[in-house]
Amino acid sequence: MTSLYHQSGPLGRMAAWGNLALIAILPITWFLPLLKNKAFYVLSSEITLWTSVVELFQTDIFLALIIAIFAMIMPLAKCGLYAYLWFVTDGSSAALRKAGSILSKLSMIDVFLFALIILAVKGLSIGSIEPQFGLYAFSSAVLLSLAVSVVTEISRKTPGAAGSAP
């Protein structure tokens, strides 16, 4: 059995390596400052995904679990599954395709959560929120993850189609 990686063209192979990079990049983005909260020109604090989850565990365990599961665990699980699909299998398993599709949808919830958090904080009208490097890094990782998902889906449906020469 030939792996999906070996059946794919250059674009598919780039997506496979991009996916492996995501496995390393995503956990790093959890600790980068996403937002800087400034209140009254004196108080300021940087917000990371990790500190948000840790602080929420002290006050709202349900919300902390939702953010930890959908913004941290699901994207990594999806990358792990895609690494398995790219390098171990030929991508023909219906169960793995279904799992990949479900994980792709669930791991995009983090974009909605961040938009909701920014909207809620801005609605308080106390202080200001400034985007930080981590927000851009995390957003870029999410976009790369989306691109990997799309190319993986194309490659599984038609092996050799994703970036192969005619």
Image: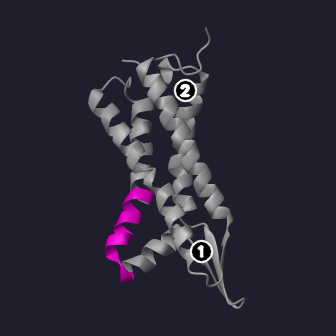
Magenta residues, start to end: 58-71
Task: List the residue tagged with mark 2.
Answer: 12
The answer to whether residue 124 of the structure is visible from this angle is yes
Q: Secondary structure at mark 2?
A: helix
Q: Which mark is residue 132?
A: none
Choose top left, top right, bottom left or bottom right for residue 119. bottom right
Q: Is 29 within the magenta?
A: no
- Position of 56 relative to 34 (above/below): below
Q: Which residue is rendered at x = 51% and y = 69% of the image? A: 117
The three-letter code of the residue at mark 2 reads Gly
* Side (left or right) of 1 relative to 33: left
The three-letter code of the residue at mark 1 reads Lys
Task: Please tell me which residue lies in front, 14 or 152.
Answer: 152
Choose top left, top right, bottom left or bottom right for residue 4. top left
Q: Which residue is rendered at x = 52% and y = 20% of the image? A: 8
Image location (x, y in percent) of residue 52: 48, 74
The span from disc 1 to disc 2 (Cα, nearest Å) is 40 Å
Q: How many marks are shown on the rendered structure?
A: 2
Quadrant including the C terminus:
top right
- Position of 131 relative to 27 (above/below): below
Task: List the residue tagged with mark 1.
Answer: 122
Q: Which residue is rendered at x = 37% and y = 77% of the image? A: 57
Quadrant including the N terminus:
top left
- Position of 74 relative to 81 (above/below): below
Task: Please tell me which residue lies in front, 153 or 80.
Answer: 153
* Discs 1/2, front: 1
Task: Please tell me which residue lies in front, 135 or 130.
Answer: 130
Image location (x, y in percent) of residue 82: 43, 37
Q: Is 67 within the magenta?
A: yes
